[in-house]
Image (spheres, helix red, strand yellow):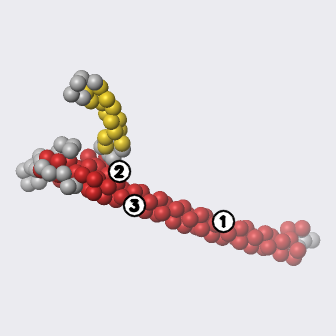
Amino acid sequence: MPTLLDTAEFVAAKDALQKAVQVLEEARKSRLTFMRECLLQARARVLSMIADARIKAALDVAVRYGGTDGDHHKAWVIDQMVRALTGCPTIQKTAVDSSGKPYAYDAMGESGEYRELVREAKAGDDGPDTYDWDVGIAP
């Protein structure tokens, strides 16, 4: 005597359920692929916006200070442009003016990318300090 598990209706239902599971799994994978593509596109747009902002900041330094006379000032402009291009953060520093009054000002700090670039720029055949990296003097 056949059991319920052997009936044609049960076998058909089981096959239909397996097919539905396959369809759902394919839909899930497709949705995940679509979501991943969307995230990758968004990431690319954000990275492009960051790169554009860095380039704009570097060009701003070049335009504002690039015409200043003196090698020490030109070195500062180059260093500031490199800092802008490598995503260095703005930090607040303090100094004392000629009358002895302290004041605060914004300056560019160092990012890991900046430190790595400087390390590579200084390295050469004679070791890690073959060349100098001149941060210059602000105009």
Asked if residue 48 lies left or right of residue 14, the reply is left
Picture coordinates of residue 87 (x, y %)? Answer: 35, 50
| Disc number lying in front (2 or 3) | 3
Kind of residue indicated by mark 1: Arg
Q: Residue 52 carries which label?
A: 3
Give the residue at x 34% y 59%: 55
Can you say whether 135 is above or below 13 in the image?
above
Task: From the viewer's side, name the closer residue of 139 and 35.
Answer: 139
Total marks in image: 3
Q: Which residue lies furthest to the top in this view?
A: 100
Task: From the viewer's side, name the closer residue of 129 and 28.
Answer: 129
Picture coordinates of residue 59 (x, y %)? Answer: 30, 58
Q: In which quarter of the image is residue 139?
A: top left
Q: Quadrant of residue 105?
A: top left
| Disc number lying in front (2 or 1) | 2
Q: Residues within 10 Å of mark 2 (few under 14, many from 20)?
A: many
- Earlier along the polypeptide chain: callout 2 or callout 3? 3
Q: Which mark is residue 87?
A: 2
Quadrant occupied by the N terminus: bottom right
Q: Is mark 2 on a helix, strand or loop?
A: loop
Give the residue at x 46% y 63%: 44
Kind of residue indicated by mark 3: Asp
Q: Which residue lies furthest to the right in this view?
A: 1
Q: Residue 28 carries which label?
A: 1
